[in-house]
Amino acid sequence: MKTATAKELRTHASAILERVRKGDEVVITMRGKSIAVMKPMSDIDKPFSPVGFGIWKGRKEMAGVTKLLDERRKERYP
């Protein structure tokens, strides 16, 4: 798997997308940490399984979206 920094993605987006189009997976890093994966969508027979959607899995505060939104929307200073 190849890597590219966020700056390289901004400056060389077309070249990186061309690598992905040809079948390479590219990990995007920011400040030395992996933040995203770009991979081709050429496998039409397989169901789409987004790579990054598991980041909220297991977080208790994300179990009830309504409760989370109500908590975020309430007044900070009564």
Image (cartoon, helix red, strand yellow):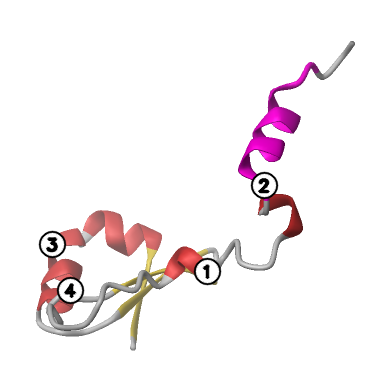
Residue 18 sits in quarter: bottom left
Asked whether the residues under the numbered discs 1 and 3 touch, taking CB atoms below 8 Å apart as contact, a structural biologist would say no
Q: Residue at x 20, y 62 (%)?
A: 12
| Quadrant where the N terminus is found in the figure | bottom left
| Mark nearer the N terminus (1 vs 3) | 3
Q: CA distance from mark 4 to mark 1?
A: 18 Å
- Identified by mark 1, the residue type is Gly
Question: Closer to the camera, 35 or 60?
Answer: 60
Q: CA distance from mark 4 to mark 2?
A: 31 Å
Q: Residue at x 54, y 71 (%)?
A: 32
Q: CA distance from mark 4 to mark 3?
A: 16 Å
Give the labeled residue for mark 4. 41
Asked whether the residues under the numbered discs 2 and 3 touch, taking CB atoms below 8 Å apart as contact, a structural biologist would say no
Q: Is disc 3 surrounded by few (<14), some (14 to 19) or many (20+) residues within 10 Å?
A: few
Any magenta on residue 28?
Answer: no
Which labelled disc corresponds to residue 64? 2
Pair 1/3: label in front: 1
Indicate the position of residue 41 as horizontal and vertical percent values.
Answer: 17, 73
Q: Is disc 1 surrounded by few (<14), some (14 to 19) or many (20+) residues within 10 Å?
A: few
Q: Which residues are magenta?
A: 64-75
On screen, residue 41 above or below 22: above
